[in-house]
Amino acid sequence: MTVYLDHAATTPLDPGVLAAMRPYLEHEHGNPSSLHAVGRVARAAVEHAREQVAAALGVTPLEVVFTGGGTESDNAAVKGIAWAAREAGRGRHVVTTAIEHPAVLESVRWLAQSHAFEVTVVAPEPDGVVDAERLLAAVRADTVLVSVMAANNEIGTLQPLDVVGPALRDRGVVLHTDAVQAFGRAPLDVDGWGIGALSLSAHKFNGPKGVGVLVLRRDVPVQPLLSGGGQERGVRSGTLNAAGIVGCGGAAALTAATAADEVVRLRALRDRLAGALLGVDGVTLNGSATRRLPHNAAVAVAGCDGEALLLALDAAGVAVSTGSACQSGAAEPSHVLTAIGAPTDRAHLRFTLGRTTTDDDVDTAAAAFADAVKRLRDAGGGYA
Amino acid sequence: MRVLVAMSGGVDSAMAAALLVEAGHDVTGVHLKMADTPSGLPGKGCCTLDDARDARRVADRLGIPFYVWDLSAPFRARVVDDFVAEYAAGRTPNPCIRCNERVKYAALLARARAVGFDALATGHHVRLSSDATGAAHLWRAVDRAKDQTYVLYMATQDQLAHTRWPVGEYPKAQLRAMAAERGLPVAAKPDSTDVCFIPSGDLGGFLRPRLGQRTGAFVGPDGAVVGSHDGAYRFTVGQRRGLGLGGVGEPWYVTAIAGDDVFVGPRALLERATVTATACSWIAGAPPTGRVAAQVRYRGVPLPCELTVTGPDSVELAFADERPVGVAAGQAVVVYDGDECLGGGTIAGSSP
C-alpha cells in the first residue's frame, strides 16, 4: 500500500465528487451554452458549481470564471490584467516575488521580454515569507499589478496578503494571488484583503484535473488570452467542461464545509510527522515553522542526495517529492530553495498531507524516512 | 534480487532490463541525464528528451519503476572537464572509461547499493562469470564487434559481485530481434557512436573554444619543422588524416606530441616495443604475470607481450613480435588472456 504524501502535487478525486460528475460524463452531454433543454441541464449544473465556488470563497457567482487549470488562471490574470492596464494607459510596471509558481514568474518574465513591461521581483526573507513593507516599497505610481501567492507550493510559507492587500487597495493597485495551495488550508479573505484576482486548481482540493478557477472582481479589467465564442464573461472562450466544472464545484463545497476541522486534523498530523523527521540528526525545516500551511513539512537532509532519498522512499512505498520535475523527469534545483538561500549540498524533501492521510501513514513515512537516511549515510551515497 | 538497470534509451539497456525482469528479478530502471543539450524549448536545458522518453516507455512496457537522475554536474566535472584537460596536456583521453569509472558504472553502483539495490545492470556488451572459488571473471562479448571490455577493465571484484551484464551473451542482431519480439519501442533504434557529448563528432570544433588557438610546429623525423598547426590538442598519436602535410611521398602519421610540437613521420616510427601504464587495475585483484596480450586502443587488436610489474599500480609491457602502433598517452592499455579481460591501466609512455 502506498503512503501518498504528495498532496501539494495533486490530491485524489473525492468519491462523492466523482459521483456528482458522472452524469455529465455518461449521458448529460449538453453544451452549457446551448439554448435548448439538453443544454440547459448542463448549464444549470455549471451555474450550480459556480455558486458552490463563489460561496466557498465569499464572492459573487459572476466573479467566478472557470478555466483549464491553475496555470491557465495565473496566465490569464497576470497577462490579461497587465495588458488591459497598459491599453488604458495606466502604466507598465508589475511587482511579484521570487518564490511564485512558474506560471506567474514565467508570465511576468514574458511580459518583460516580449511586451516591454518593467518588473520588480521581490526576494523573500530567509524564512520563506515575503516582507510586506519591502513588497509595498516596490510599488510605484505606474504599477498596474502585484502578484503574490497566498502560500508557497514547495515550502508552504504563508504570504502576508492580509497586510499587502488592503494597502494596495488603498493605492488603487490590483492584487492577484495564486491561492492554489492555500485554498481550504489557510484563511482567504478575498473581500477583506482586497484581492482583485485569484487562481485555484480543482485537483489540488480533491477535484478533477484540468479545471481551474479564476476569481475576477468586477472592477478589474482584463484582456482575454483566448479569442473565441466569449464564454465566461468573455474572459475565457471555449466550450465549458461541464463534468470537470461540476467536480470543481463539488470539491470546493466539500473543502469549504470541512476546512475548519480538516486544518486542525492536518496540523496535528503534520506536527507529528515533522517532529519525527526533525528528530533525525541533520534534518532541518525549510521555511518558517509558524507562518506555514498546516499540511506541509519541507525538510533539508544533510549527508544525503535528494534523488537517492526519493527513490529509497518510493521503493518503501512512500510517495513524496524533491524539487520539481523537468521534462525528462529529472528533479531540478528549485528556484524557491535558491531564493531562500537553502544549502545546495542537502537533500530537500517535501511531505504534504491531505484528506485521506492517516496516523498510520505518517508513522510509516517517518519510519521509512529514518531508515532510508541512515542507510544512505552509512553507504556514503554515490554522488553526494 | 533487487536490480537497478541504467537505461540509456537504447536497445541494449532495454534488453538488459527485459532479460532481468524475465529472470524474475525485482528491476528498477534509471535514466542518467548526462548533459544539458537543447530540448527544443528555449530557456530549458534538458537531456536528450527522446532518449529519456524512450527509456521511460520501455520501463512502462516492462512494468518496472523508472527514474531520471540528473548527473550532468558530476558528468561535466568528472568526465568532460577531464577530457579537455587531458587534451590540453597533450594526452588522448578515453572519456567512456572515465565515465564508467566516475559516473556511469562505479559511482552509480555505489549509489544503487546505498539506496538498497543488490546489483546494478547496464547494457554493456561484456560477459561475467564466477569460478569455483566465487571469484568473478570478465569476458569479451559474444558479439566481438560490440565488445566493451576495453572500457570496463577497471571493475573490481567487489563491484563485479554486484553487477549484471546480461546482453553480452547475445549478438546485437539477435538482441534487436528479441527486442522486437517483446514489442520494445527501441528495437530498431540506431546504435550510438562516438563521444556522447560531442554529437557532431567534431572534436576540433569542441576543443577549440575551450582551449583556444595554440599555434605549434609539425616536426619531421629529422627534427626539421615541416609545417605549422593551430593546436596540438587536435591531434592524436597514430593519426594520418587531416595533417595538411601534402607532397611528402609516403603517408605521414603523428608519432608523438610534446607541448605544442606535433612530431610526424612514416608509419615505421609509430611502432612501439614497450608500453608503460599507470593507475592499473586488475580484475583478479593482482596483476597477471608473464605472457599476456595487450590492446592499446578501443577498436584495436590485442598483441602478445610480456608483462612486468614496475610499481604498486604500474606495469611495463614488452612486445616481442608484432608491435603496436598508435600508442597514445592517456588511452588505456587493456590486458587479455584469450577472451578474458584481466585488467589494464592508463598509458603513460612508450618507447620504440
Image (spheres, coloured by chain):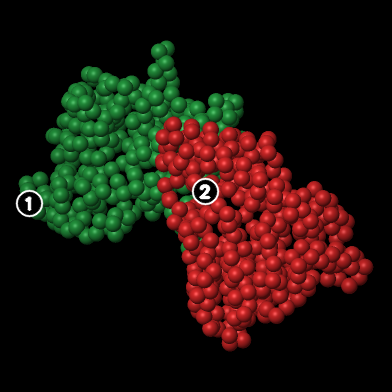
Q: Residue A43 location in percent, x, y? A: 85, 67
Judge the density around disc 2: few (<14), some (14-19), many (≥20) Cα neighbours within 10 Å: some
Residue at position x 73%, y 78% from top? A218
**Position of B207 compared to A330: left or right?**
left
Q: Colour of chain A?
A: red
- Badge 1 marks a residue whose secondary structure is loop
Query: At label 2, which amino acid type do we have?
Result: Leu
Quarter the C terminus of chain A occupies:
top left
Circle 2 or circle 1, nearest the eye: 2
Quarter the N terminus of chain A occupies:
top right
Residue behind mark 2: A285
Name the one closer to the observer, A366 or B164: A366
Q: Residue B40 location in percent, x, y? A: 50, 60
Among the 4 quarters of the image, the one containing residue B161: top left
**Position of B45 compared to A161: left or right?**
left
**Badge 2: chain ID:** A
Instruction: Say whether residue A229 is visible.
Output: no
Residue at the farthest right position: A37
Q: Colour of chain B?
A: green
Callout 2 and callout 1 share a chain:
no
Residue at the farthest bottom position: A89
Q: Residue B129 location in percent, x, y? A: 43, 21
Up the image or down, B288 lies above or below B182; here it is above
